[in-house]
Amino acid sequence: MDKIFDLKNTIINILDSNKALDIVTVNLENKSSMADYLIIASGTSSRHMQALSEIVLEKFKSNGIATCKIEGKDSNDWKLIDGIDVVVHIFNTEKRKFYDLEKMWSELIPKEKVLI
C-alpha cells in the first residue's frame, strides 16, 4: 500500500478514536501540488482542538515528518497541522461553517490552475 494513503488513514483513525467530529477527507490529486490529502475535522472545545492537534503532530513526527508543526497554536477557532503530503485542519463548528473548505476543495479546478 501507498505510505501516504496509510498515513492518511492512520490520522483519520486517530481523530475518530479521540472523538473528533465530522471528519472529511479531500483528495487533492489534480487539484493542488501542496499536498495529496486534506483532512478536515471539528473539535468540541478549544482544549479538545489543541489536544487533537498535538496528537496528530506526534503521529506525523513518529512517521518521520520531523519538520511538521501546528499553525494557529494560539487560536481557539482553528488549527492546521502540516504533514507535508497530508494536511489536517481542525476547526470549531462555527469557523468550519464559515470557511467551508470542503466545498471550496470539492470544486473542479481547470488543469492550468492546478499548480500553486
Image (tube, rainbow, N blue to C red):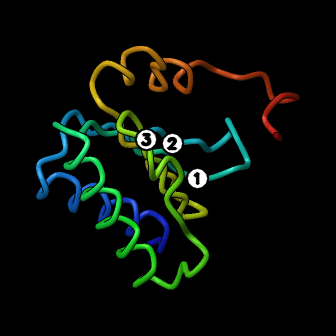
Q: Residue 46 got which mark? A: none
Inter-mark Cα distance, 1 to 2: 6 Å
Q: Position of residue 34 (x, y in %)?
A: 70, 50
Of the numbered discs 3 and 1, the one sitting upstream in the chain is: 1
What residue lies at 73% left-to-right and 48% top-to-bottom? 33
Q: Which residue matches tag 2?
A: 27
The amino acid at mark 1 is Asp
Say left or right for 84 vs 5: right
What residue lies at 22% left-to-right and 33% top-to-bottom? 22
Q: Secondary structure at mark 1?
A: loop
Say left or right for 41 vs 104: left
Q: Nearer the viewer, residue 16 or 1?
A: 16
Question: Local crowd at mark 2 within 10 Å, few (<14), some, or many (≥20)?
Answer: some
The amino acid at mark 3 is Ser
Q: Position of residue 90 (x, y in %)?
A: 36, 42
Question: Local crowd at mark 1 within 10 Å, few (<14), some, or many (≥20)?
Answer: some
Inter-mark Cα distance, 3 to 1: 25 Å
Question: Is the residue 3 above or below the residue 73 in the image?
Answer: below
Q: Secondary structure at mark 2?
A: strand
Q: Which residue matches tag 3?
A: 75
Quick one: which residue is furthest to the front in this view? 74
Circles 3 and 2 in contact, beta carbons < 8 Å: no
Q: Secondary structure at mark 3?
A: loop
Of the numbered discs 3 and 2, the one sitting upstream in the chain is: 2
Q: Of discs 3 and 2, which sits in the foreground? A: 3
Question: Is the residue 105 above or below the residue 37 in the image?
Answer: above
Number of marks drawn: 3
Say left or right for 15 vs 98: left
Q: Position of residue 10 (x, y in %)?
A: 29, 66
